[in-house]
């Protein structure tokens, strides 16, 4: 099993300079490969990431000697990432979707590079971990904020920058799971705006609403950024003033803080669910359509429904839980969890579900119970005949 542990690094000035240089090399290799891919394609050739990596190796000593100053994994893995981007692009085109074409990378936006690309016995750059230190090729030992939680062989290390901090994402091949399952059972999960999630057993999971709580600070910094100056340097390019750079750094830190708070709450919620339930039912929410409601869009995005679904999916596979996703037309909110009757209309203002059978229940809890019943029924059918019927998507 491959598990990744992302840890904050504490580099010195020399190591920070190396990280910036390696990120620049990775960005240069990616942009060069994308430009070369387009040129070859227009000339009727069939470009591939493997051929482009060989081509770069044959010319980088003469044309890009600065690439020799960093680990060889940085440019090579960057071109592999371009190959993955094109695979994703062509797969979505084949499925009739409208994907975005791979774009050139910009300096200062998602700076990262692959520091190692495999075990030493295969001739690759390798990393070593000793307590709260990690040894990377060329630059040597770098201090880490904490110890690695998993034991096993290190397959790859990716160094990235968010705001003014550097992180190492350590990919480890291990047999040990980070947690142990606590309970079994079925559960329905209804996502909402007031509460992040309501479970069918009555458990309510609060969302931190980090963006809403820090919105005043965001507005203040955005206003300061709009008022800061830019000037044209000696080469004719527009450059930020010193004050503008300071405001940009503060704004990036605040955005990182918001993202960290949201991601932490989602990890805690999804881990709790998969450790306590082995049959889980959720809805396939049309988040893109939901955010078109201007009154609710900010609150919907603040909860992170897409990230919740993504985390729940891979964690369910990791802990052998069955995750069933009801299609977006499933009437979880309109259906009575007691008698099964379906209301023709149900406004968002109605927070209590009332049925003619006498059932009076919280709207979100009612939806969660319906999702639990849905998941349990499909799990029984799947276990009986090995397949599921139309109307459910089994993702784990």
Image (cartoon, helix red, strand yellow):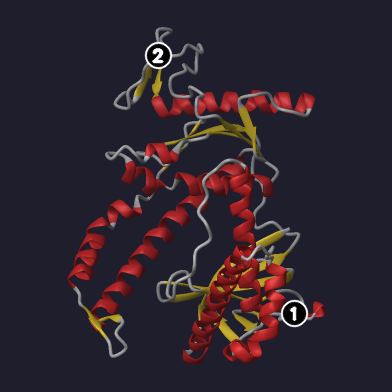
Pick the residue in front: 73 or 47: 47
Residue at the far left: name it. Answer: 227
Asked if 109 appears above or below 87 in the picture, the reply is below
List the residue tagged with mark 1: 124
Pick the residue in front: 114 or 77: 77
User: Which quarter of the picture shows residue 223?
Assistant: bottom left
Pick the residue in front: 114 or 176: 114
Cα distance in 3D space between marks 2 and 1: 62 Å
Report x, y in % for residue 193: 36, 39
Say left or right for 390 vs 268: right
Q: Which image quarter holds the C terminus? A: top right
Asked if 127 appears above or below 352 in the picture, the reply is below
Mark drawn on residue 344: 2
Residue at the far right: name it. Answer: 121
Report x, y in % for residue 307: 50, 49
Mark drawn on residue 255: none
Tell me the element at label 1.
Answer: loop
Residue at the far top: name it. Answer: 356
Q: Which residue is drawn at 62% across and 51% down?
A: 90
């Amino acid at each position: 099993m491959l598990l990744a542990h992302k840890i904050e690094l504490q580099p010195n000035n020399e190591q920070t300079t190396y990280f910036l240089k390696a990120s620049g090399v990775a960005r240069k290799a990616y942009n060069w490969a994308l430009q070369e891919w387009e040129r070859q394609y227009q000339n009727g050739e069939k470009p591939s990431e493997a051929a482009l990596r060989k081509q770069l190796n044959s010319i980088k000593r003469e044309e890009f000697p600065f690439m020799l100053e960093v680990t060889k994994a940085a440019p090579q893995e960057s071109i592999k990432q371009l190959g993955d981007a094109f695979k994703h692009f062509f797969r979505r085109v084949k499925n009739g979707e409208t994907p975005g074409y791979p774009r050139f990378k910009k300096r200062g936006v998602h700076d990262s590079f692959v520091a190692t690309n495999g075990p030493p016995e295969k001739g690759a750059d390798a990393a070593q971990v000793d307590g709260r230190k990690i040894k990377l090729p060329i630059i040597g030992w770098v201090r880490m904020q904490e110890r690695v939680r998993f034991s096993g062989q290190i397959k790859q290390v990716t160094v990235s920058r968010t705001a003014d901090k550097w992180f190492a994402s350590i990919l480890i091949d291990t047999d040990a799971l980070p947690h142990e399952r606590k309970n079994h059972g079925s559960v329905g999960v209804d996502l909402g705006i007031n509460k992040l999630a309501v479970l069918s057993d009555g458990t309510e999971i609060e969302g931190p609403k980090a963006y809403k709580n820090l919105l005043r600070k965001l507005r203040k910094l955005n206003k300061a950024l709009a008022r800061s100056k830019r000037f044209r340097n000696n080469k004719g390019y527009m450059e930020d003033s010193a004050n503008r750079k300071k405001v940009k750094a503060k704004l990036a830190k605040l955005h990182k803080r918001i993202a960290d708070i949201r991601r932490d709450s989602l990890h805690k919620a999804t881990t709790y669910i998969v450790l306590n339930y082995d049959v889980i039912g959720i809805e396939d929410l049309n988040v893109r359509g939901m955010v078109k409601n201007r009154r609710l869009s900010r609150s919907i995005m603040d909860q992170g429904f897409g990230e919740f679904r993504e985390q729940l999916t891979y964690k369910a596979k990791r802990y052998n839980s069955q995750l069933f996703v009801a299609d977006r037309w499933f009437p979880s909110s309109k259906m009575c969890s007691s008698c099964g009757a379906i209301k023709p209309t149900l406004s968002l203002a109605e927070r209590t579900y009332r049925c003619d059978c006498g059932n009076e229940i919280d709207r979100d809890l009612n939806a969660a119970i319906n999702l639990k019943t849905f998941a349990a029924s499909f799990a029984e059918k799947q276990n009986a005949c090995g397949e599921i019927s139309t109307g459910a998507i089994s993702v784990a």
